[in-house]
Amino acid sequence: MDFEDIWRRKFRINLETPRFVLRPLIAEDVQWLTELFRDVDVNRFLWSTEPAEARRTAEAVVFLDMHRSHFGVWAIQDKHDGVIVF
């Protein structure tokens, strides 16, 4: 096991409140991130909201967070219904 594996097992943890789970991104998060990146109001000054480009951006964010970042984007998921609120 290399340093990265050890680090990830130790620090890529879920944080929980009574209502929410805060967790690192996983592959399944590409879909909701794509929708977020397609939102004109969210991305007014950032990047294109074209569907294909939004998907590529979401895939890159998830990949980099899972494989390279130590403290990246986290998903906030409602415990009751599983909906991602960010």
Image (tube, helix red, strand yellow):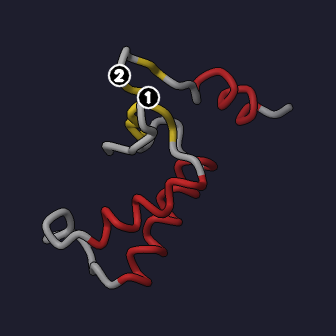
How far is the residue under mark 1 from the one under mark 2? 6 Å
**At 41% across and 30% down in the image, what residue appears?**
80
Q: Is residue 9 above or below residue 34?
A: above
* In the image: residue 69, left or right of residue 85: right
* In the image: residue 85, left or right of residue 45: right
**At 31% across and 43% down in the image, what residue appears?**
85
Q: Are marks 1 and 2 in contact (CB under 8 Å)?
A: yes
Q: Is residue 17 above or below residue 9?
A: above
Q: Residue 30 at x, y = what percent?
A: 50, 61
Mark drawn on residue 79 = 1
Q: Residue 86 at x, y = what percent?
A: 32, 45
The quadrant where residue 36 appears: bottom left
Could you say whether the residue bearing mark 2 is in a helix, strand or loop? loop
Q: Residue 56 at x, y = what percent?
A: 48, 75
In which quadrant will I find the N terminus? top right
Could you tell me the amino acid type at mark 2?
Answer: Arg
The quadrant where residue 38 appears: bottom left
Of marks 1 and 2, which one's residue comes earlier in the chain?
Answer: 2
Q: Residues within 10 Å of mark 1 (few under 14, many from 20)?
A: some
Q: Residue furthest right?
A: 1
Q: Is residue 70 above or below residue 14?
A: below
Could you say whether the residue bearing mark 1 is in a helix, strand or loop? loop
Q: Residue 25 at x, y = what percent?
A: 51, 45
Q: Residue furthest top?
A: 18
**At 51% across and 65% down in the image, what residue appears?**
60
Could you tell me the amino acid type at mark 1?
Answer: Lys
Q: Residue furthest front?
A: 81
Q: Is residue 45 above or below residue 3?
A: below
Q: Which residue is mark 2?
A: 19
Q: Residues within 10 Å of mark 2 (few under 14, many from 20)?
A: few
Report the front residue among 85 and 61. Answer: 85
Task: Give the total of numbered labels.
Answer: 2
